[in-house]
Amino acid sequence: MSQPSSLSFTSSLDSSLLVCDVAGSYRLAAPAEVLQAALRVLAGQLRGTEMLSSPQAVRDFLRIKLGTLEHEVFAVIHLDAQHRVIEYVEMFRGTVSQTSVYPREIVKEALARNSAALILVHNHPSGVAEPSRADEMLTQTLKSALLLVDVRVIDHLIVAGPTILSFAERGLI
């Protein structure tokens, strides 16, 4: 099976996305191929950009990456001193309603990447973006642990389908 080399829209009214393989033949793109291409574009827009001046790109990336998962994922977006993206890292995977998060591991990853700040991210497969008391306590625990090594927590985002809740916007950080 050959790897897709480019994507383009057809001129037909349905605007189907086509994939061109290495041999130059076109076929309809599978939904997974469309999502993977979108993730590559959005990740490219985030890397090295000023995170705080591009909240829509962050939200779009996270909606595609985490919004449809049927299990919880806890991730971290590592930022440099100018709040440019160093890397997005999925740290922990859980069940449909919870995931275990280990502060020590997050601190280790932040130090390994020389992060100056982090954005914490996790999804709620239930589709309800409201933070639980456990979410709030975890955020405070991580914030305290990271402050010991001079890494700031800028925000904690909860992705619930198309909805994204920001702890910073709610005054919870």
Image: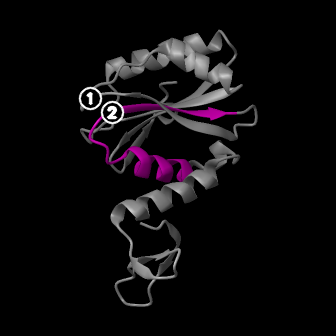
Magenta-colored stretch includes residue 115: no
Picture coordinates of residue 29, whole percent (x, y): 39, 71
Picture coordinates of residue 97, whole percent (x, y): 25, 29
Mark 2 in CB contact with mark 1 (< 8 angstroms): yes
Indicate the secondary structure of the residue bearing disc 2: loop
- Of labels 2 and 1, earlier in sequence is 2
Indicate the secondary structure of the residue bearing disc 1: loop
Crowd tier of the residue under label 2, counting other residues whose Cα lies within 10 Å: few below 14, some 14–19, many 20 or above: many
Crowd tier of the residue under label 1, counting other residues whose Cα lies within 10 Å: few below 14, some 14–19, many 20 or above: few
Q: Residue at x 50, y 55 (%)?
A: 39
Q: Which mark is residue 67?
A: none
Q: Who is closer to the viewer here, 113 or 140?
A: 113
Picture coordinates of residue 123, whole percent (x, y): 36, 36
Q: Who is closer to the viewer here, 123 or 34?
A: 34
Residue 5 relative to residue 115: left or right: left
Picture coordinates of residue 101, whole percent (x, y): 41, 19
The residue that label 2 is drawn on is 72
The residue that label 1 is drawn on is 95
Residue 92 relative to residue 94: left or right: right
The answer to whether 20 is drawn above or below residue 155 in the figure is: below
Q: Who is closer to the viewer here, 147 or 96?
A: 96
Q: Which residues are magenta?
A: 56-79
Which amino acid is tagged 1? Thr
